[in-house]
Image: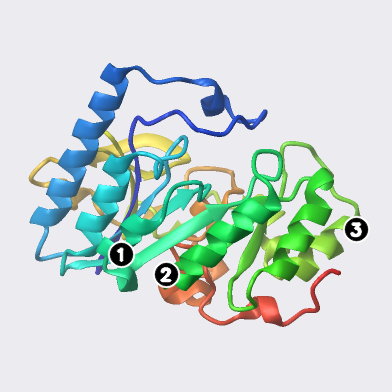
Amino acid sequence: MTLRILYRGSLSSCNYGCDYCPFAKHTETDAEHDADRRALDRFVAWVGEQCDRRISVLFTPWGEALVRKRYQDALVTLTNMDHVEKIAIQTNLSCRLDWVERCDKSKLGLWATYHPGEVTREKFLAQCLEADRRGVRFSVGSVGLKEHQEDIAALRAALPEHIYLWVNAYKRQLDYYTPDEIAHYTRIDPLFPVNTVRHPSVGETCQAGHTAISVDGDGVMRRCHFVREPIGNLYDPDFADALQPRLCANETCGCHIGYIHMDRLGQYDLYGDGLLERIPAQPVWRALPMSP
């Protein structure tokens, strides 16, 4: 069994200033950075000790981690461990990319988010093309705000065809999209309709808490980011005793990093080896004509 870990330390700052994100407005102190560094070092060391267990990790920071050298070094170290299958991270792709040459790129995955209000399309596209040239496996995506429809469609048209572009539905406002807008984003990302739904989940079987867990900087384990009840601590010698099948306790699940673990939705088969970096196993995005 491969244990998939979603790691979120205490990093809570970003080099972007998106209006909807509280972490864009926080500047961390040196002491806060030191605490996050110690937690990250401890986690990397723990993974290194688990030689009898196959491990994959998705870093889901509250902020932008790859502008910090400590996170670049962590990905380098982790991808070069024999028992590690995949290391992926959510990023705005604003960092330098030379550090990826020290990684085992066959185990590296990037989940790159485009923020049209924070970076020009040309600059973001240049970063994507450099990552592609360097042989990094990655997906690209953006929040499907109404005002960003043209930017996202233009980015899809400019990207190489083999790169998947996903669209996250904006779900803070009920009935946000018109049928035409849903059709527009579905032409860009055929999986967009799956993300528009808050999937009924209470009582559903789910890999969260069994083969996938969420871990914070102190090692506290939870089923996923959206079920707050702890199930143990990663650094306890008997942590594996807590890994067992569980039924979902939440009424609905509307976030990709949550519902991909629901057995009923078949997302493991859909994404295969690209589960953590959000790349479908088959190029389903080529099945529909793209928006002009």
Q: CA distance from mark 1 to mark 2?
A: 8 Å
Q: Is residue 55 visible?
A: no
> Where is 24 relative to 267, above or below?
above
Residue 273 picture quarter: bottom left
Dots 3 and 2: beta carbons under 8 Å? no
Whichever of callouts 1 and 2 sits on the residue coming sooner in the sequence is 1
Residue count near mark 2 (Cα–Cα under 10 Å), binned few <14, some 14–19, many ≥20: some
Q: Which residue is mark 3?
A: 179
Q: Amino acid at mark 1?
A: Glu
For residue 101, the mark is 1
For residue 134, the mark is 2
> Where is 23 relative to 65, above or below?
above
Q: Quadrant of the C terminus?
A: bottom right
Q: Amino acid at mark 3?
A: Pro
Which is more foreground, mark 3 or mark 2?
A: 2
87 sits to left or right of 224 = left
Q: Is residue 37 visible?
A: yes
Helix, strand or loop at mark 2: loop
* Display colour scheme: rainbow
Helix, strand or loop at mark 3: helix
Residue count near mark 1 (Cα–Cα under 10 Å), binned few <14, some 14–19, many ≥20: few
For residue 203, the mark is none
Dots 1 and 2: beta carbons under 8 Å? yes
Q: Residue at x 63, y 75 (%)?
A: 160
Q: Position of residue 216 (x, y in %)?
A: 31, 37
Choose between 183 and 108: the one closer to the eye.
108
Q: Amino acid at mark 2?
A: Arg
